[in-house]
Image (cartoon, rainbow, N blue to C red):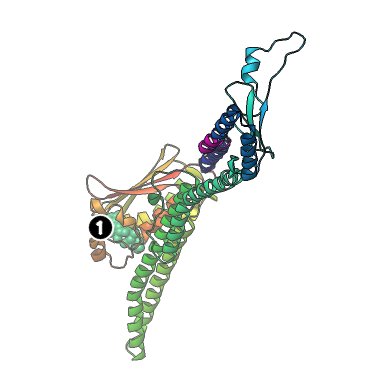
């Protein structure tokens, strides 16, 4: 079985997880990066302090500068100072331009701040002369990244959780959709809606769940058919039993009233025989329909079987000419002597029954493919073309047959078809061009037994 569902689930899950990891990492880095800079208004304030310190310094009023520094430190609860950084190169060495440009005592206000340092950094605002600096430890209120822990929690816990829940919900609905349909269908079926089917409701998808739906539909189809057939069988059987029962009832009433008992007893016996054969045939039919058995335990010679059936028919219908054209032998294996005998007998008996006395019935057996083809031609009225299939339905009889042979029940061909199919063959009816019916039966020569 192809694991379609596995790949269908695996794809989005694997891809979704990869994308999620990438997005979380990317957003984490981006936000951390963005949160590492001092806010623009704080940068302005720091620069303004630098300018104030520079102005006070150049004004030469050291006391004013000292007061301002003291007041600033107290107000912002920080450390601030104005310092000189005259770097004196010694031993004849020189200061390179790169060194002079990059030399700072603290950090530029526009630089990135390391959020993981516990100590706040010292900011450096260099005066115009290049070697006097206003230094201030970044006040706590200006420290960036205040909400970093919360943002990280959001990104690393809340976001993956939300995305995974969304993914789980999509997968859940994808799996539960067909299962829900199956559940509803099973419930509807159990409540008697035999026509319910699931596969058409699942659209174009094709995976293990649609396979399950197809299996359900097949099961519903077969079980539904069986239930309907059995219902029909019971209804027809009850109907057919009514007539002999009524006759028996009447015969018993007459016997009770003392009217010619001798004549009624054989009638009761006859009706009982009819009922027994009806019930037996109906039970065999129900068994063949329900169990769909494979009748494959006998080896037999069709020529012998046909010889003996034809012989019986000649005896039973002496007014008919029954011709047979059979090969010397026609052995078949993996079949059922009993089922084939009963089926062929029914067909030959029909041919004799529906052919007027003096008419011909021709039985021909010949090899055909990997089996044998048996044709039984008669000179009866044939069957209307649109009823050639219907005559294999249990209890179905043509109007003409009802008039000509009121004692038939319409079970012979239904039984014959199921028996022949259970033995691996088939049977068909066709009208002969010159009048009469041709029944064609085919039997496999050798059949491997079903495991
Ligand atoms: N050889 C035939 N010629 C004409 N009609 C036939 C022939 N064989 C069968 N039929 C038609 O098919 C119907 C069904 O045949 P089937 O053998 O099942 O039932 P039946 O002969 O009426 O009764 P049963 O066999 O149960 O006694 C018959 O009633 C008849 O209408
Ligand atoms: Mg019959």
- The verdict on residue 36 being magenta is yes
Q: Residue at x 40, y 72 (%)?
A: 275
Above or below for 272 versus 359: below
Whether residue 428 sits left or right of residue 449 in the image: it is left
Q: Quadrant of residue 30?
A: top right
Whether residue 339 sits left or right of residue 38 in the image: it is left
Q: Residue furthest right?
A: 91
Residue 260 in picture, x, y percent from top left: 33, 86
- Please name whichever residue, 102 or 156, is drawn nearer the observer in this view of the structure: 102
Q: Quadrant of residue 268?
A: bottom left
Q: Ligand 1 within 8 A of label 1's CB?
A: no
Q: Locate the N terminus and report the quarter of the image it occupies.
A: top right
- Please name whichever residue, 407 or 224, is drawn nearer the observer in this view of the structure: 224
Residue 375 in picture, x, y percent from top left: 35, 46
Whether residue 310 sits left or right of residue 118 in the image: it is left
Span colored in magenta: 35-45
Could you tell me how many numbered marks the image carries? 1
Q: Please tell me in which quarter of the rendered image ligand 1 is found.
A: bottom left
- Please name whichever residue, 220 or 433, is drawn nearer the observer in this view of the structure: 220
Q: Quadrant of residue 101?
A: top right
Q: Secondary structure at mark 1?
A: loop
Residue 35 in picture, x, y percent from top left: 56, 38
Q: Residue at x 63, y 37 (%)?
A: 69
Residue, disc 1: 356
Q: Residue at x 61, y 40 (%)?
A: 143
- Please name whichever residue, 42 or 321, is drawn nearer the observer in this view of the structure: 42
**Which secondary structure dominates the residues rendered in magenta?**
helix
**Residue 139 visible in the shown view:** no
- The verdict on residue 213 being magenta is no
Q: Residue furthest bottom?
A: 257
Residue 136 in picture, x, y percent from top left: 64, 35
Q: Residue at x 41, y 63 (%)?
A: 188
């Amino acid at each position: 079985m192809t694991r379609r569902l596995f790949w269908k689930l695996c794809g989005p899950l694997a891809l979704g997880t990869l994308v999620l990891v990438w997005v979380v990492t990317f957003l984490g880095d981006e936000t951390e990066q963005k949160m590492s800079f001092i806010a623009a208004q704080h940068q302005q304030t720091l620069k303004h302090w630098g300018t104030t310190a520079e102005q006070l310094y150049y004004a030469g009023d050291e006391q004013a500068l000292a007061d301002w520094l003291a007041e600033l430190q107290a107000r912002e609860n920080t450390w601030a100072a104005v310092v000189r950084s005259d770097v004196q190169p010694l031993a004849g060495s020189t200061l390179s331009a790169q060194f002079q440009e990059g030399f700072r005592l603290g950090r530029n206000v526009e630089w990135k701040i390391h959020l993981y340092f516990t100590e706040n950094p010292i900011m450096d605002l260099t005066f115009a002369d290049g070697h006097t600096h206003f230094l201030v430890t970044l006040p706590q209120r200006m420290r960036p990244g205040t909400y970093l822990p919360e943002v990280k929690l959001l990104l690393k816990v809340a976001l993956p959780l939300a995305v995974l829940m969304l993914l789980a919900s999509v997968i859940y609905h994808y799996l539960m959709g067909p299962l829900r349909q199956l559940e509803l269908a099973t419930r509807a079926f159990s409540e008697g809606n035999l026509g319910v089917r699931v596969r058409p409701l699942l659209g174009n998808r094709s995976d293990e769940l649609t396979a399950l739906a197809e299996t359900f539909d097949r099961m519903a189809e077969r079980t539904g058919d069986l239930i309907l057939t059995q219902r029909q069988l019971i209804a027809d059987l009850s109907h057919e039993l009514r007539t002999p029962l009524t006759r028996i009832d009447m015969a018993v009433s007459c016997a009770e009233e003392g009217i010619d008992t001798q004549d009624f007893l054989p009638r009761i016996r006859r009706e009982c025989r009819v009922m027994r054969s009806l019930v037996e045939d109906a039970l065999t039919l129900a068994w063949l329909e329900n169990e769909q058995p494979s009748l494959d335990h006998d080896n037999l010679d069709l020529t012998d079987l046909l010889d003996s059936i034809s012989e019986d028919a000649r005896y039973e219908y002496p007014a008919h000419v029954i011709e047979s054209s059979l090969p010397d032998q026609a052995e078949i294996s993996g079949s059922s002597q009993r089922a084939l005998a009963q089926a062929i007998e029914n067909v030959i008996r029909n041919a004799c029954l529906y052919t007027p006395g003096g008419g011909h019935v021709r039985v021909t057996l010949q090899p055909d493919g990997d089996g044998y083809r048996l044709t039984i031609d008669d000179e009866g009225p044939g069957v209307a073309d649109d009823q050639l299939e219907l005559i294999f339905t249990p209890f179905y009889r043509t109007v003409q047959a009802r008039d000509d042979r009121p004692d038939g029940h319409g079970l012979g061909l239904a039984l014959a078809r199921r028996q022949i199919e259970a033995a691996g063959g088939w049977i068909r009816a066709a009208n002969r061009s010159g009048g009469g019916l041709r029944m064609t039966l085919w039997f496999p020569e050798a059949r491997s037994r079903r495991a």
